[in-house]
Image: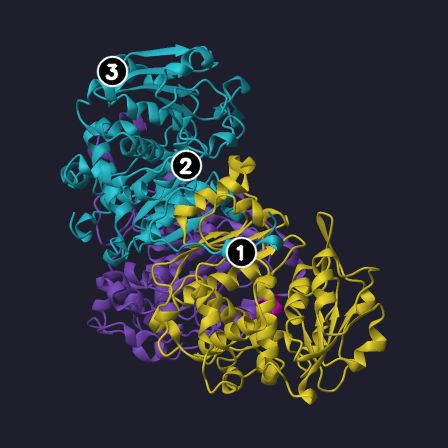
Chain colours: A purple, B cyan, C yellow
């Protein structure tokens, strides 16, 4: 249908208060909150005040669930009237451009009435190109109250924190981590199947989790796996599907060995696909200084041999590893996953900036 | 005069509340509102709630006049105290960079106390370059309340709307349309000669409209012409001046045939110039994937053979088709036209976001 | 220390209300205000209402001190509750990208509850690249209330002011001036040694000022020197250290001749360094259309032969002319200098936009 053929009715949108995804499964924040009679577990959130969010290992299962509960409450309620971030300034410093992630954070801040200093492309800083990240961190001390940084170098986190005195939220550092993405992933899982939030999920509700990708060189996959290892009462098995001989990498070797969750690694998606309840896909791997896409063998589409009630997750943006013909199916959890991002980031920012007390009724 | 020779008096500006243009004709919002005893025609504005603004054909004459009345009211009054867009977020997604248009929209939103998520250069989205517009539309669903998009592809509007559930304002799509620019153009005309807002303008106040440019490949010109065809009671004749054999293009062939306004096409500006009341100039045409400037034959300057009371319009930015020596003359309506842009966009956004009721006294 | 080895305690930051520098000397706004029993000299600030801030020569000593007093008050108090710039829009037009300076201004505006229209990279304006600065100034008239511009051309100030009717703040124009940087520099000096704010500083508190750099081609250095010439009761001598035969340039020849402060020019930093109380360093010089760094002979580090109580200033960003091994020493005034920038710009913006009356208790 072209613009010229549109009638007036077809161009009118309901200005609903509640934002959600256009296709795929719709998730219910109510069902997650129902597990605790609507209550948010407050102590782990209070403990986040003033913390930097750098690596999923700083969390535990209880904290992940509490952040999800707060996100659910924020998703359901119109918190603008509370203006919880009033007077706070967040700096979004994207030394590796990412419109998607930057806007997600900036929307989160502004919805809660905070303000944003935006650096859409930190590589373009004119003659000061040679400035060290340590000096940039010093500069940020008086400019804002929290710094949200994405950077292509894994070491960038340590470098900027040499002088930075404000909480730092790691929005992706090279092949390092992307902790808020992992929280977003689990927020979707906990809304989809709320029993996963219990310390001991009923056995018939536990999931077999498949991850298509290489945790060692994909930060989103690495952070998701790291968080998943905390859910031993909910995840009965994790299968890594990768073309790499050693997909795990150094960071996660120990956590995997210590986790009670059985983990296996396969390099053919076809055998394992029919056994998976959740299929997590990502396409983009760091290789040295550049990115490369996943092997085409791992492409999913509507004809893939999925369990009938399996759900697919993807941190997006996608390339052709995830076919659009899945969008209209119930396997599509990835649009609902993306739709929860703003609320998880709102929850993290409110906790880090110690403004939980501004949200009425929590 | 150089900075060094400036005295203090010369660097002091009156901090007037009312912003206007520096040179050329000053237009009066009061005179337009006087045609209706200060009243704004409310029903066509209410009908815009939740609508996308994609193509001028979705308007009619009455809607164009009502938007202009609301713009006039906003231009005259300090509406900040009403904060009509409080709590609303607009996404300015410029996949084709345009500082002028982007800032115009962002100023409109912020003056009304809305917030902005800015994408100054949508081509720079890092590794997600391959992301489809449909996926970007999905992402925007939870980020903002309205999306303002400029894109070099004419099909971009249909593409992003595959998943986007929020109202979309088309700020220019390839060789397609630029509907808010056309509203801005008519707002200037209606302030300049308020009788043009009447269904039947007195014959001696009707105008002969000349358009230098190629509607088929120039979206601003196309949208202006499309809107002008609705003003059969006010426009007595339209003359298109173009070097192209068929300047009209497919989109407007039918509307032109159906309009009672006589239209002729000439390729020499000199013959027709002395007969025109309004001369609309634009310089930039799409040719394939790139832009080209208008032929130099169509250049206007202070020595051009204009009627003494003729006015020149231009959507700006200009190149050398419009000489600066016209700036200080009464032919210059283009600076006043530009100065009205913010108020027209305020009117459109307030109507689309269903916040008319927040403006006291309307 | 890597991210992986961080304990929770190590990633927690005190969410202090008062922002300051991480290393080097901490400066006290209280001590500057104590010189006037906490009072701000109001008349010179009132005189700034509606003024453009273009060149340090428009100031006098009294105005510089008054701006510093207001900055000190803003640094000490939580002025967000006053919302002094509520309803005002600042346009940050950076035709020469500078993340540091742009964010500093944008933080200043937003801390006072004003709004920002941001042009991070004014060279990227799409097809309108050929637009004149005069036309851009015309466009800005209705978009914002004050324009903050950085531009690589010295003439840009005069060019945009051909049509601009709003106050303009020059944030650096080619080899011209950078007046707010000079105010920031003096704010740091006046906090460091408050007696310098007196018309007649006690002789044993006066300073010998050394400037490593070339005022003729370095705008920050030029503006700092121009302001320093106003402090004849506080500066006992100025020594310029430069590799250039004539480092001063045309702009300052006359002010230097007219100033009672003795000025000498040397090209070897070693001889003079042990005599200096204040060493001002900058590294970046304009040469034609490009930049070049300072000669390596002028590099300072912890082994440099500085007076024990000498302080080093630098407008930042730095390259290797200023070694990081000085950061932890008491010579480091440059981090405190940078930390005052936001407050000085807040003071200037509040005065220019005539909103002093909104700050309670001034």
Which residue was labeled with disc 1? A214
Q: Which chain carries label 1?
A: A
Above or below, comparing residue C49 to residue A23 in the picture: below
The number of discs equals 3
Main secondary structure type of the part rendered in magenta? helix
Q: Which numbered disc covers residue B259? A: 3
User: How far apart in space, not on screen, are marks 3 and 2 (Cα)?
Assistant: 30 Å
Q: Are marks 1 and 2 on the same chain?
A: no
- Which residue is more in the foreground, A127 or B239? B239
- Which residue is more in the foreground, C100 or B41? B41
From this viewpoint, is residue A158 visible?
Answer: no
Write down the quadrant of residue A344 in the picture: bottom left
Q: Which chain carries label 2?
A: B
Residue at x 56%, y 69% (from the top left corner):
A139
Report whether B173 appears left or right of B205: right
Dot 2 lies on which element?
helix
- Which residue is more in the foreground, C261 or C324? C261
Place of residue A126 in the rendered image (x, y in percent of width and height, measured from the top left): 62, 54
From this viewpoint, is residue A102 visible?
Answer: yes
Which residue was labeled with disc 2? B335
Above or below, comparing residue B304 to residue C348 in the picture: above
- Which residue is more in the foreground, B106 or B111? B111
């Amino acid at each position: 249908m072209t613009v010229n053929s549109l009638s007036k009715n077809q161009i009118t949108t309901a200005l609903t208060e509640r934002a959600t995804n256009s296709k795929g499964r719709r998730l219910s924040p109510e069902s997650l909150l129902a597990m605790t009679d609507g209550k948010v577990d407050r102590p782990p959130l209070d403990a986040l005040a003033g913390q930097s969010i750098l690596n999923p290992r700083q969390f535990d299962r209880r904290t992940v669930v509490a952040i999800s509960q707060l996100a659910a409450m924020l998703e359901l309620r119109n918190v603008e009237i509370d203006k919880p971030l009033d007077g706070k300034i967040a700096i979004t410093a994207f030394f590796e451009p990412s419109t998607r992630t930057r806007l997600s954070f900036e929307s989160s801040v502004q919805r809660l009435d905070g303000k944003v200093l935006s650096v859409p492309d930190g590589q373009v800083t004119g003659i000061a190109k040679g400035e060290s990240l340590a000096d940039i961190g010093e500069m940020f001390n008086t400019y804002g109250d929290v710094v949200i940084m994405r950077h292509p170098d894994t070491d960038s986190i340590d470098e900027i924190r040499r002088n930075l005195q404000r909480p730092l939220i790691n929005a992706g550092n090279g092949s390092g981590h992307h902790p808020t993405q992992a929280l977003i992933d689990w927020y979707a899982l906990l809304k989809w199947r709320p029993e996963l939030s219990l310390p001991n999920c009923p056995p018939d509700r536990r999931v077999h989790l498949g991850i298509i990708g290489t945790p060692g060189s994909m930060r989103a996959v690495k952070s998701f796996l790291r968080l998943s290892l905390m859910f031993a009462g909910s995840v009965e098995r994790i299968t890594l599907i990768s073309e790499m001989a050693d997909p795990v990498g150094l960071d996660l070797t120990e956590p995997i060995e210590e986790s009670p969750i059985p983990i296996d690694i396969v390099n053919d998606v076809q055998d394992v696909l029919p056994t998976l309840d959740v299929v997590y896909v990502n396409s983009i791997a760091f290789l040295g200084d550049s990115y490369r896409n996943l092997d085409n063998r791992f492409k999913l589409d509507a004809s893939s041999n999925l369990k009938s009630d399996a759900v697919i997750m993807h941190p997006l943006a996608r390339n052709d590893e995830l076919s659009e013909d899945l969008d209209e199916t119930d396997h599509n959890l990835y649009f609902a996953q993306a739709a929860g991002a703003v609320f998880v980031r709102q929850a993290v920012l409110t906790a880090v900036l110690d403004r939980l007390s501004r949200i009425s009724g929590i």
